[in-house]
Image: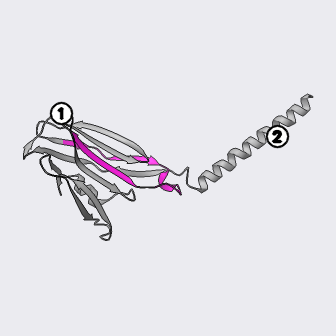
Amino acid sequence: MSSSKLKRLFIVVVSIAFLSLVSTLVFADMFGLLKKQDVVLSREVHGLLLDNGQPLSNVKVFRVLTYGEEYLDQVVTDENGHFYFPDKIIRSSKPSQMFFNSSLNQHIYAKTDNDDELVLWYARIIQAEDSETLTELLNHLVCDITNDAKTYDIPAKEDPSKLFVIYTRCKL
């Protein structure tokens, strides 16, 4: 094959590859696959872990946040039974994706010395969004491991017709 034919073939192949890349990017942008935004998975958690009213120290507490992917944090209670998790905010294109299920699971549990996993807080939030109601609840968790976990329907302050279903052994 002559060098001029090779040059033309190379130009055609490069042009097709370029057009394919551009059209893919346009398609992805059109369906929101490239638009990233902040998603609040959890506001700060300030908690107190008790056993029959007495503070539990040196207990591992885990926060698992599931939003398409799983995010895991672990802390240990201090000598007074307090634990703390910072805000968890991610950048994600998932809210813009047409077919993404934007539900969020918040799961906080303690792991005792005998490896029992005790649910302190579990909430499934249908639309992942920042909520004053959840912020206030997570800011003052008082959890006694001798309490039975119960399910609560908590109306959102932002929209009282919207309920947060929370399974917890913490005082709400």
Q: Position of residue 144 (x, y in %)?
A: 13, 48
Q: Is residue 114 left or right of residue 125?
A: left
Q: Which mark is residue 156?
A: none
Quick check: 97 above or below 8?
Answer: below
Q: Residue furthest bottom?
A: 161
Q: Position of residue 58 (x, y in %)?
A: 16, 34
Residue at 37% over, 53% down: 104
Quick check: 57 above or below 163?
Answer: above
Q: Residues within 10 Å of mark 2 (few under 14, many from 20)?
A: few
Amino acid type shown at disc 1: Asn
Quick check: 119 above or below 137?
Answer: above
Does 100 lie within the magenta span? yes
The quadrant in which the C terminus is found is bottom left
Residue at 32% over, 44% down: 64
Quickly name the residue at label 2.
12
Amino acid type shown at disc 2: Val
Does 145 lie within the magenta span? no
Q: Secondary structure at mark 1?
A: loop
Q: Position of residue 95 (x, y in %)?
A: 47, 55
Residue at 73% over, 43% down: 18
Q: Looking at this view, is 132 or 156 the one in front?
A: 156
Range of the magenta residues?
83-110
Residue at 51% over, 56% down: 96
Mark 2 or 1: the one toward you: 1
Q: Which mark is residue 114?
A: 1
